[in-house]
Amino acid sequence: MKHLVGIVGFRGYSGMELHRILERHPHIDPVLLEHRADVGEQSNLRRKAGPLRLPCTAEAAKEHGLAAVLLATPADVSIGLARAFLDVGVKVVDLSGAFRLQSPENYHRWYREEHMEPALLAEAAYGLPEFCRSRIPGARLVANPGCYPTAANLALKPLVAAGVIDRPAGIVCDAKSGVSGAGRKPSLKTSFCEVTENFSAYSILEHRHVPEVLMYSGIEEAEFSFTAQLLPLDRGILETIYFRSAKLESAAQLIDIYEAQYGEEPFVRLYEGGRVPDLRSVQHTNYCDIGVKFDGTTGRAVVVAAIDNLVKGAAGQAIQNLNLILKRPETEGLL
């Protein structure tokens, strides 16, 4: 018997990626939940005998026995939908930023809006499986991490825990993303003529993904400088992270720290010998690839982390979390 899992926002880039992955999942069948009035809008979903389409209501989800719902919707929409599904016993994995920041005050500061479900905000389990795996299986509500914080936390958290970063000297994260990270809704900023042959920085010193890095890597805001930049390509994130260390002698020591943390992790791949990843290495996969360089004379270190923003940064990681809350092997449908 397969689990039925609803997808809300299936016309967006992350939603289409969820559908693509779940189509090949051996123990889950996707159900498309219509939550918009413009249901005749074109999408890239193939027309075939399925998948099942239902109205986006808690009643329909309960009647058809949905085990969980994936919300690939803006934060305000997710806040409005989550409670109804949870109240009828349907678990929720939310891909927006609606439930990531733990407190209404933190949410208000970074999203500039009041949070209308503070109890759910406090309840939600943060869905970075490599560090939060023990809490996810028992959660009703999982907050899928942002794409930039996924790469940043996987790169930084083991090094912060090992105490090898000179934190007062500062950590710089130079993060570049493909345009799909901005979503499918048309805008001038992400139109072809604005993006092609161009390269631009945005949300400088106020990007709403910054607090996720601070909360889960354990660093302070004054220690961390983050700049997001838009690449003229469709998908992928590459983050180049700079810091200093007086406690290291070689790049091999950095790799040893990562190996101790990620040696058994199915979706983190480490590069050796001074090699670093590029975007082609991770596109259309659920991997986070990490490589390092270190100058022992000056103590300068560079870590390069790469992910696909639509897979490990969104839909793939959501399905990792979905597998965990449905008590399935974490890698199902993803390898």
Image: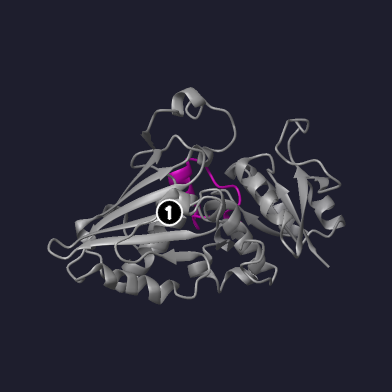
Answer left or right for 143 relative to 153.
right
Q: Who's the residue at 39% across and 29% down the image?
A: 198
Is residue 321 located in the magenta-colored stretch of the structure? no
Query: Whole-percent x and y of residue 76?
Result: 60, 42
Query: Is-magenta flag for residue 107?
Result: yes
Q: In the figure, is residue 323 to the left or right of 149?
A: right
Q: Residue at x 65, y 62 (%)?
A: 322
Residue 197 x, y percent position in the rendering: 40, 28
* In this picture, residue 118 sits left or right of residue 54: left
Question: Which one is nearer the viewer's eye here, 251 or 327?
Answer: 251
Which picture quadrant has residue 295?
bottom left
- On the rendered structure, is 326 left or right of 187? right
**Residue drawn at the location 47% of the way across and 27% of the way down:** 189
For the N terminus, give its image quadrant. bottom right
Closer to the camera, 134 or 14?
A: 14
Q: Residues within 10 Å of mark 1 (few under 14, many from 20)?
A: many
User: For the magenta stretch, what is the residue range?
Assistant: 100-120
Q: Secondary structure at mark 1?
A: strand
Of residue 144 and residue 232, the one placed in the foreground of this image is 232
Q: Is residue 241 visible?
A: yes
Kindly identify which residue carries mark 1.
Answer: 306
Which image quarter holds the C terminus? bottom right
Name above or below for residue 318 compared with residue 226: below
**Residue at horizontal 45 percent and vertical 65 percent from the top:** 269
- Residue 15, position in %: x, y? 65, 46
> As shown in the figure, which amino acid type bears the numbered disc 1?
Ala
Classify residue 219 by image quadrant: bottom left
Q: In this view of the protein, can residue 209 be seen by the observer?
A: no
Which of the 4 image quarters holds residue 199?
Answer: top left
